[in-house]
Amino acid sequence: MYKFKADQTSCHRKLINISRYSATDRLHRWLRLLLLLSFIVLAGCKTVPLQDRNYTDSGGFWEQSTSSQARFHHQAYDKNDEIGVLYTSGRNTILNGSAINVSSDLDNHSFISNGPHSAARLEFKGEDEDDGDTCVITIDRFNWGDAYADTYDCWYHIKTPHALLKAKNAILHIDVTSTETEVVVISGAIKVFTHGDPVQSIDVISDQEVIISHQTIHRPRSISPDEVWKRISWRAQFQLYKTVIDWRMVAQTAVTVGMVAAIIAIRIFAGGGQLNRYPRSHGFGRF
């Protein structure tokens, strides 16, 4: 009686161990499969130039040049939400304290600075339709350097040491120095405020330039296409890249891996369970 009980317990333990090994084996197989799929997808990743620099989604974009910095807040999204994509040129773009190479997701309240021989482009998401909030992107701590902005369907509130700029459905170029902020409106219209009198503002329209110094807005003047081109020529001096998945390469890699796996499987079965064709030794198999 007791012997049967002991045998039954032993069998139960063996079944548990078998099920454990079976579950572990299944887990290992799934992990190997995931690693294989990851390898196949990574094999298809490649870096390509960003072709259409003037393309914009509904959230618009912002480009800033060498030796510039700014912080970005998208009102339609929460603090830790992703609000767009950052593309970089050069190796001296810092996002929230970390160096970025090629591209990165852009989180709300991010701070971006560009060192020597580097520049950045930020493409913003549009309004979050579930919230119903007005699409407002605030750009502050922009204290030095050049920037090019296409605001598209969002309001951009751009803060420099000398002025507050409000723009929507407009394209503009901004040059900030220690003494003044120079703004060229390439298309559309913007509103310009000084920090000294935030209630009063002036409108600056397409093909006009305005200079704002401390508490003073100078009279806007007309600007020629050649002058506009000189202002924005720095954009052509750096190339942006992005990482994409080449699905053709992924398919080719998958086919190659499948063929290699099939050849290995055929050799194993043909060799009686081993990868080579040598006969199995029975010297230590049985006594």
Image: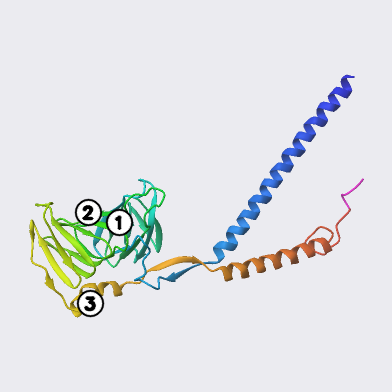
At horizontal 88% and vertical 49% (from top left) the residue drawn is 285
Q: Earlier in the sequence, mark 3 or mark 1?
A: 1
Whether residue 283 is situated above or below residue 244 in the rendered picture: above
Q: Position of residue 229 (x, y in %)?
A: 23, 77
Quarter location, residue 64: bottom left
Residue closest to the eye, 246 or 137: 137
Residue closest to the eye, 246 or 204: 204
Whether residue 197 is situated above or below residue 207 in the rendered picture: above
- Type of the residue with mark 2: Arg
Residue closest to the eye, 210 or 199: 199
Mark 2 lies on a secondary structure that is loop
Which residue range is magenta in the image? Answer: 283-287
Going by the picture, which residue comes out furthest to the top?
A: 1
Residue 64 appears in the figure: no
Going by the picture, which residue comes out furthest to the bottom?
A: 226
Whether residue 53 is situated above or below residue 1 in the rendered picture: below
Q: Disc 2 versus disc 3: distance between alpha carbons? A: 26 Å
Badge 1: residue crowd in 10 Å (few <14, some 14–19, many ≥20): many
- Type of the residue with mark 3: Trp
Tag 2 near tag 1, CB within 8 Å: no
Q: Disc 2 versus disc 1: distance between alpha carbons? A: 10 Å
Residue 275 is left or right of residue 257, and the answer is right
Quarter location, residue 34: bottom right
Q: Position of residue 244 (x, y in %)?
A: 48, 66
Mark 1 lies on a secondary structure that is strand
What residue is disc 2 on?
Answer: 141
At horizontal 61% and vertical 58% (from top left) the residue drawn is 37
What residue is disc 1 on?
Answer: 112
What residue is disc 3 on?
Answer: 229
